[in-house]
Image: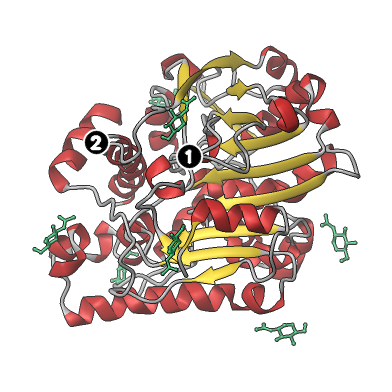
Amino acid sequence: MKTPRLLDLMAAMVLLVSVASSLPPLVSGDPGRRVSMTLVRGAAALGAFCLDGSLPAYHLDIGFGAGSNNWLLQFEGGGWCNDIASCVDRSKTRRGSTRFMSKTAVFTGILSNNASLNPDFYNWNKVRLRYCDGASFAGDAQFRNGTSMLYFRGQRIWKAIILDLLPKGLAKARKALLTGCSAGGLSTFLHCDNFKNYLPRTANVKCMSDAGFFLDAIDVAANRTMRSFYTKLVSLQGIQKNLDPNCTRAFYPEPSLCFFPQYALRFIRTPMFILNSAYDVFQFHHGLVPPSADLTGRWKRCKLNVTACNPHQLDALQGFRTDMLGALMNFFRNSTRGGMFINSCFDHCQSALQETWLSPTSPRIHNKTIARTVGDWYFGRRNGAKEIGCPYPCDKTCHNLIPTSTTADSLVNLDI
Ligand SMILES: *[C@@H]1O[C@H](CO)[C@@H](O)[C@H](O)[C@H]1NC(C)=O
Ligand SMILES: *[C@@H]1O[C@H](CO)[C@@H](O)[C@H](O)[C@H]1NC(C)=O
Ligand SMILES: *[C@@H]1O[C@H](CO)[C@@H](O)[C@H](O)[C@H]1NC(C)=O
Ligand SMILES: *[C@@H]1O[C@H](CO)[C@@H](O)[C@H](O)[C@H]1NC(C)=O
Ligand SMILES: *[C@@H]1O[C@H](CO)[C@@H](O)[C@H](O)[C@H]1NC(C)=O
Ligand SMILES: *[C@@H]1O[C@H](CO)[C@@H](O)[C@H](O)[C@H]1NC(C)=O
Ligand SMILES: *[C@@H]1O[C@H](CO)[C@@H](O)[C@H](O)[C@H]1NC(C)=O
């Protein structure tokens, strides 16, 4: 019962990334720059390894001109593994080992170095942190049984990468933005304050999570599927000691709840921007309607195309949006330095794709693109950097990036 769900969570991540990147580009010209991988040699001394024991890595595109002293770090995403079997599987793929990763990364969207595609950050130093620990860069444990060994060392990987980057110029950063999508968007919440602590006091440091606001949702079978999943993850990978102590104290005796952004948020002191779709397809397919909650397949067509949803299913989707906005209400009303862009599209991750970050047809709220809203917030160009879109079906600017079932099946076999 459990393992299929895990595989499914991971497969879906692989799938969404692939579906998104295979879309025809809507912006002509710049196809995205390929940036090569740097292995972190110093990581071994810190015991910072990928699941399989390989060295962690990042891709660095050096900044230029007025951006030379500014740094943008982006956590790669890609689901989680929360039991030995799924982590063993993962350690044999690009999600758990740098040995299996492509050695170049395409930098587009918020990582683009083209001023017309990424006006506010194009000339910054930009780093993509490769994800190979399976716990949003937050675990610290290991598994050993005589024949197998797994490293759960996400927190040390995070530290090893930062220590490697500091002498390369990060130590002198004037402006910095920590970001990431999906599991990497969750990492952004978890490491935001810690990131600020490594940088000069005078630096302007902010964090922007993309599709990382995973809700403590109740699924359509009335179970807290995400909560059970994360509780197992926190326990397996030794995450609890790396969660914000003020939060874990407040949530005793359920400290693992602090892995959920909605509970950790009020303890984060560094300015945060929350970018998320209110119908994020990953959360729709795995938090609201996980396969375990739809054994009869009544949701199958609706999951693939919202126009096939019946009124009862649409109610559930609107309820999910209402819950997300409810979880964000305190932040919306009370955070003076925060920003948000909560639109109503069926997609997942909008800052790393050029089509959704900034293009003639990219998603908008009040006619503002994501790139513009994030830039205005970062640079304080205008007040009220918090945008909430109207509920489905009113947003006509969406790119609905929903996987189809046939590609899903083949990708499961391909990647897991
Ligand atoms: C930057 O992007 C624009 C718009 O797509 C394109 O016309 C231009 O050629 C690109 N510039 C470079 C240097 O790639
Ligand atoms: C160690 O764990 C792996 C993965 O679960 C398993 O395949 C193997 O049989 C285990 N070995 C022993 C000695 O228990
Ligand atoms: C989900 O909830 C139903 C009843 O609400 C229960 O019978 C079932 O065991 C639960 N499934 C899981 C996987 O927790
Ligand atoms: C915990 O909260 C106290 C009081 O608000 C604050 O001074 C301290 O820095 C916080 N600690 C951490 C680790 O966030
Ligand atoms: C969803 O279904 C509608 C109506 O059948 C169709 O027009 C639309 O293209 C479909 N969307 C996708 C993403 O398949
Ligand atoms: C905003 O903060 C005030 C004071 O701390 C609190 O009373 C109020 O409930 C908060 N608003 C929301 C919407 O949570
Ligand atoms: C929306 O913004 C574009 C520029 O980004 C502008 O050309 C257009 O007139 C605006 N539309 C409305 C309805 O304000």
Q: Which residue lies under the disc numbered 1?
A: 109
**For residue 84, side relative to residue 204 (left or right):** left
Tell me which label, 2 or 1, sits earlier in the chain: 1
Labels 2, 1: front one: 1
Q: Residue at x 63, y 66 (%)?
A: 385
Q: Which residue lies under the disc numbered 2?
A: 412
Provide residue 341's location: percent of width, then percent of height: 52, 63
Q: Residues within 10 Å of mark 1 (few under 14, many from 20)?
A: many
Image quadrant of residue 254?
bottom right
Name the quarter where the C terminus is drawn.
top left
Q: Residue at x 69, y 65 (%)?
A: 382
Q: Nearer the viewer, residue 13 or 133?
A: 13
Q: Nearer the viewer, residue 165 or 99?
A: 165
Height in image: 60 above or below 375? Answer: above
Which quarter of the rendered image does ligand 5 occupy? bottom left
Estimate the spatial distance between the alpha carbons at disc 2 and disc 1, rounded to whole Å: 27 Å
